[in-house]
Image (cartoon, rainbow, N blue to C red):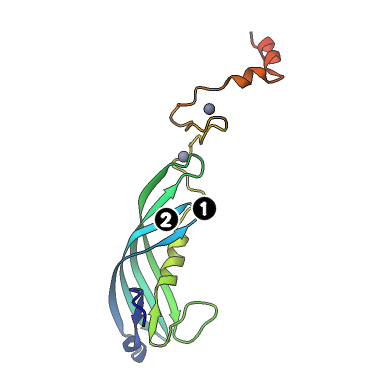
Amino acid sequence: MTSSPFVVPVSDLMSTAGSRRELDLDTPIEWGFELAAVGPELHAELILENASGVLIVRGPVATDLGLTCHRCLTEWSEPLQVDIAEAIGFEDDTDGYSLHGDDVDLEPVLRDVLLLEVPLRPLCRQSCLGLCATCGADLNTGSCLGHDEESTLPFAELRDLLEP
Ligand SMILES: [Zn+2]
Ligand SMILES: [Zn+2]
């Protein structure tokens, strides 16, 4: 026996073509993704429907996305809402999702859908300047005042001559 809130018995739907049922999910989740965290809560108002031999799962899924800027490492959180529409085979289907006995496990379905919404390289804003490579200061805040080593570069003197 599993106590996962994502595992739902659907034998009633499987027995009658065209039958449907509503399913509200309110559950904490702990799905780590690279540079992002989904959750900590997930809310979904789903409709499960037997449509000619497949179980259709559709409806809005809402959670929060905790992101870390790829350049400056600033962290922030933003709401994430996705309308899902997925088909789950009644028979074992190695190409997609399938039922486990009389149950459907919606966790991999929802995980896959939400993973697609996670940006690969989150940016706090498109123009983010990132961190100073020398001192690590956040260049967006202007807290790095520059470094002296520029004047020791071989071309610095030449540049001074060209730009009086
Ligand atoms: Zn940033
Ligand atoms: Zn610096």
Helix, strand or loop at mark 1: loop
> Which residue occupies the foreground of this view, 2 or 111?
2
Q: Quadrant of the C terminus?
A: top right
Helix, strand or loop at mark 2: strand
Q: Residues within 10 Å of mark 2 (few under 14, many from 20)?
A: some
Q: Amino acid at mark 1?
A: Leu
Q: Is residue 149 above or below residue 97?
A: above
Residue 80 location (% of width, % of height): 36, 56
Q: Residues within 10 Å of mark 1 (few under 14, many from 20)?
A: few
Q: Gap in Å between the C-alphas at discs 2 and 1?
A: 12 Å
Residue 145 location (% of width, % of height): 50, 22
* First in sequence: mark 2 vs mark 1: 2
Residue 120, numbered label: 1
Looking at the rendered structure, the number of numbered marks drawn on it comes to 2
Q: Quadrant of the N terminus?
A: bottom left
Q: Residue furthest top?
A: 164
Residue 37, numbered label: 2
Q: Amino acid at mark 2?
A: Ala
Residue 25, numbered label: none
Answer whether labels 2 and 1 touch (C-beta < 8 Å).
Answer: no
The residue sitting at 33% across, 86% down in the picture is 13
The residue sitting at 50% across, 45% down in the picture is 70
Task: Locate residue 56: give its quadrant.
Answer: bottom left
> Which residue occupies the foreground of this view, 46 or 77?
77
Is 142 left or right of 27, judged from the image as shown?
right
Residue 47 location (% of width, % of height): 31, 75
